[in-house]
Image (spheres, rainbow, N blue to C red):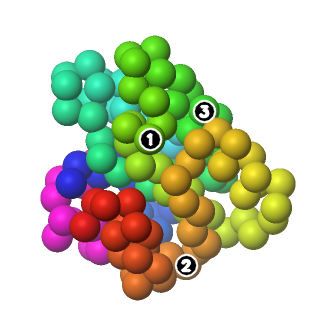
């Protein structure tokens, strides 16, 4: 499983990386702009990400915008959400507006911080990634 962790908080990044390293290669981006660029490059190289863990609150470009742009990039290449990267929004924001916006932009799951390893692995199992 090829994973992109998009997180500006060092501790959250390390936690996700430690959990996901055992399942395949893990790349890091620290903001939404880097995430969009990394996803585009991976798609162009023919090796797209299987999983993207995407924080919502980040500098330069937030996760909601990055999610929308990543899905647009996939669609432009003829890859629609059910066949594209599985995207899990990771955030401390437990409000309905953000949850609905993320699902409207076609995220696959929404997990609250601090990330619970068991819940993360459960979601990965539901998505067929484990």
* Other residues around mark 2 within 10 Å, as few (<14) / some (14–19) / many (≥20): few
- Magenta span: chief secondary structure: helix
Q: Percent position (x, y) of residue 60?
A: 61, 35
Q: What SS does tag 1 mark? A: loop
Q: CA distance from mark 3 to mark 2?
A: 24 Å
Give whichever of 82, 1 is nearer the camera. Answer: 82
Q: Which residue is mark 1?
A: 82
Q: Is residue 93 left or right of residue 36?
A: right
Q: Which residue is mark 3?
A: 68
Which quarter of the rendered picture does the N terminus lie within? bottom left
Cβ–Cβ under 8 Å for marks 3 and 2: no
Instruction: Note whether residue 12 is visible.
Output: yes
- Label 1 vs label 2, nearer the camera: 1
Q: Percent position (x, y) of residue 30?
A: 46, 47
Q: Residue at x 64, y 39 (%)?
A: 105
Q: CA distance from mark 1 to mark 2?
A: 27 Å
Q: What SS does tag 2 mark? A: loop
Q: Quadrant of residue 17?
A: bottom left
Q: Is residue 10 above or below residue 34?
A: below
- Label 3 vs label 1, nearer the camera: 1
Give whichever of 80, 101 is nearer the camera. Answer: 80
Q: Could you tell which of marks 3 and 2 lies nearer the N-terminus?
A: 3
Q: Which residue is mark 2?
A: 114
> Which residue is situated farthest in the top direction here?
76
Q: Which residues are magenta?
A: 18-27
Q: Percent position (x, y) of residue 29?
A: 40, 45
Give yes or no for residue 4 being in the magenta stretch.
Answer: no
Cβ–Cβ under 8 Å for marks 1 and 2: no
Q: CA distance from mark 3 to mark 1?
A: 15 Å
Q: What SS does tag 3 mark? A: helix
* Other residues around mark 3 within 10 Å, as few (<14) / some (14–19) / many (≥20): some
Q: Is residue 31 left or right of residue 49?
A: right
């Amino acid at each position: 499983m090829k994973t992109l962790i998009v997180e500006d908080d060092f501790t959250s990044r390390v936690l996700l990386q430690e959990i996901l390293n055992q399942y395949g290669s893990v790349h890091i981006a620290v903001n939404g702009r880097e995430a969009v660029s990394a996803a585009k490059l991976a798609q162009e190289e023919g090796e797209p990400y299987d999983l993207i863990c995407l924080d919502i609150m980040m500098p330069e470009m937030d996760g909601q915008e990055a999610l929308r742009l990543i899905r647009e990039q996939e669609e432009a290449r003829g890859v629609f959400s059910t066949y594209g990267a599985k995207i899990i929004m990771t955030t401390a924001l437990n409000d309905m507006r953000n949850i609905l916006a993320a699902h409207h932009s076609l995220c696959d799951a929404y997990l609250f911080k601090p990330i619970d390893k068991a819940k993360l692995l459960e979601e990965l199992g539901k998505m067929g990634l484990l």
